[in-house]
């Protein structure tokens, strides 16, 4: 089965958010709902909005440039530029 662009984005987003959340030793993030929402979202714009809101609301990333760098990394990886 060939993965679509949105599937690649979702897979990488879940992996990277898990990795980022693990950097906070004193915080426990339950990513179950996050992963379910990401997996069932097929609109890239809605996915970006949801993930960005999640990163800010859980204070995983706090600054606008950090979120921008997160998305730049995701899209470069999906495009095979990294």
Image (cartoon, rainbow, N blue to C red):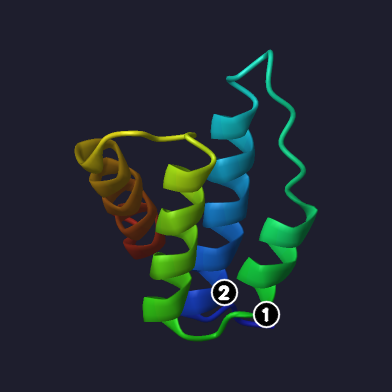
- The residue drawn where x is 67% and y is 70% is 37
Name the quadrant containing residue 64.
top left
Residue 82 showing in the rendered view: no
Name the quadrant containing residue 17.
top right
Do callouts 1 and 2 mark residues in contact (Cβ within 8 Å)? no
Residue 81 position within the rendered picture, expressed as x and y whole percent measured from the top left: 27, 52
Which residue is most to the front?
A: 57
**Could you tell me how far apart the alpha carbons at marks 1 and 2 are, in whole angstroms?**
10 Å
- The residue drawn where x is 49% and y is 46% is 57
- Marks counted in the figure total 2
Residue 9 position within the rendered picture, expressed as x and y whole percent measured from the top left: 48, 65
- The residue drawn where x is 26% and y is 51% is 72
- Which residue was labeled with disc 1? 40
30 and 10: which is toward the camera: 30
- Which residue was labeled with disc 2? 7
Residue 32 position within the rendered picture, expressed as x and y whole percent measured from the top left: 79, 54
56 and 77: which is toward the camera: 56
From the image, state whether disc 1 or disc 2 is nearer to you. 1
50 and 1: which is toward the camera: 50
């Amino acid at each position: 089965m060939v993965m679509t662009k949105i599937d690649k984005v979702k897979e990488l987003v879940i992996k990277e958010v898990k990795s980022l959340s693990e950097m906070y030793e004193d915080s426990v993030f339950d990513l179950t709902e996050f992963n379910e929402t990401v997996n069932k979202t097929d609109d890239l714009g809605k996915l970006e909005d949801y993930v960005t809101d999640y990163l800010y609301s859980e204070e995983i990333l706090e600054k606008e440039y950090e979120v921008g760098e997160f998305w730049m990394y995701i899209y470069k990886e999906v495009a095979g530029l990294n």
